[in-house]
Amino acid sequence: MDDPQLSPAPLVSIITPMFNAEQFISQTIESVQKQTLTNWEMLIVDDCSTDQSREIVREICKNDSRICLIERTKNAGGPAAPRNEAMRQARGKYFAFLDADDLWLPEKLEKQTSFMEQDRELFLSYTMMTTTEQHGDFQQSSNHYRPLDNETIFKQLLLRGNMVPILTVMIKNQNDLGLYFDESPGIVSCEDLDFWLQLAYAEKKFAFLDATLSTYRIHNANISSGMINSIQTNLFLMRKWRSKISLWFAVKVYALLFWRRGMLLLLRDVIPTSLWQTAREKLGIIKKI
């Protein structure tokens, strides 16, 4: 069998939307350049940044031909359109997703491609991740990510929310399927969950790799940081997929959505920030490294 690292075509295409990421993009690219698997291409789609992001990437591209900067002429208002643009141009056997402010551990691509190669039926794999925020480093509890045996992945995604963090995901090149991220304005911050739902509804096989290979960075500019916005986008998502599920299952999903989000909003309003953070650690939602 030929060594995929020596193939003229990239084994992995890395999809990176970028908007005003001058603080982080160099570190993000560096985490890709440090990968033990070297046969990759990185497609960075700039969504009309107004800071120095494009200039930073242009300079890096001069010294690494595996990195390609694609410059949009109109802002899309979210990462879906930039991701789709990169996916349509990608040449890799696999696609991996890395936003412009996140990081990968050095063995991320090597371990995950090896995992994917072991099962020809496997379409999407995802892993654990760590989370970095302004107050320190935290590691997400693993229970949320593990798939349950008694439900389909499609139903689990609707019931449990996004248990598949996009920066941990690797999928097969899917351009022949014609499935892409929904670019509707109402779905911004849930477009990744919607894409997983599309793949799950098409009965593509998902698998969880129990390894921590990525780091998600929390900061004020994160699109998904607002809980009210999260409720609105989840409602948009439910309207979109309502016809694919039973009435009883829809009621169950709505009840869980409002219970989880409503309680969190109430708690955040009445509990001091330091106590809120401690409570999250005690409950196992996050824990200090």
Image (spheres, rainbow, N blue to C red):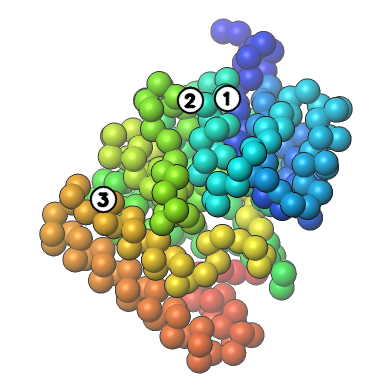
In the picture of the structure, the residue carrying the numbered disc 3 is: 241
Residue 222, numbered label: none
Spot occupied by residue 203 in the image (x, y as percentages of width and height)? 28, 34
| Three-letter residue code for mark 2 | Asn
Q: Which element carries disc 3, helix, strand or loop?
A: helix
Q: Earlier in the sequence, mark 1 or mark 3?
A: 1
How many other residues sit within 10 Å of disc 3, few (<14), some (14-19) or many (≥20)? Answer: some
Spot occupied by residue 143 in the image (x, y as percentages of width and height)? 44, 59
In the picture of the structure, the residue carrying the numbered disc 1 is: 90
In the drawing, does residue 33 fall left or right of residue 235? right
Spot occupied by residue 125 in the image (x, y as percentages of width and height)? 47, 38
Q: Which element carries disc 1, helix, strand or loop?
A: loop
How many other residues sit within 10 Å of disc 1, few (<14), some (14-19) or many (≥20)? Answer: many
Is residue 89 visible to the viewer in this orientation of the structure? yes
| Three-letter residue code for mark 3 | Trp
Q: Earlier in the sequence, mark 2 or mark 3?
A: 2
The residue sitting at the front extreme is 74
* Number of numbered callouts drawn: 3
> Which quadrant, please, contains the C terminus?
bottom right
| Three-letter residue code for mark 1 | Ala
**For this rendering, which residue is in front, 154 or 25?**
25
Q: CA distance from mark 2 to mark 1?
A: 8 Å
Is residue 209 visible to the viewer in this orientation of the structure? no
Q: Are marks 1 and 3 in contact (CB under 8 Å)?
A: no
In the picture of the structure, the residue carrying the numbered disc 2 is: 173
Task: Identify the residue at horizontal 74%, vertical 52% (top origin).
Answer: 50
Q: Which element carries disc 2, helix, strand or loop?
A: loop
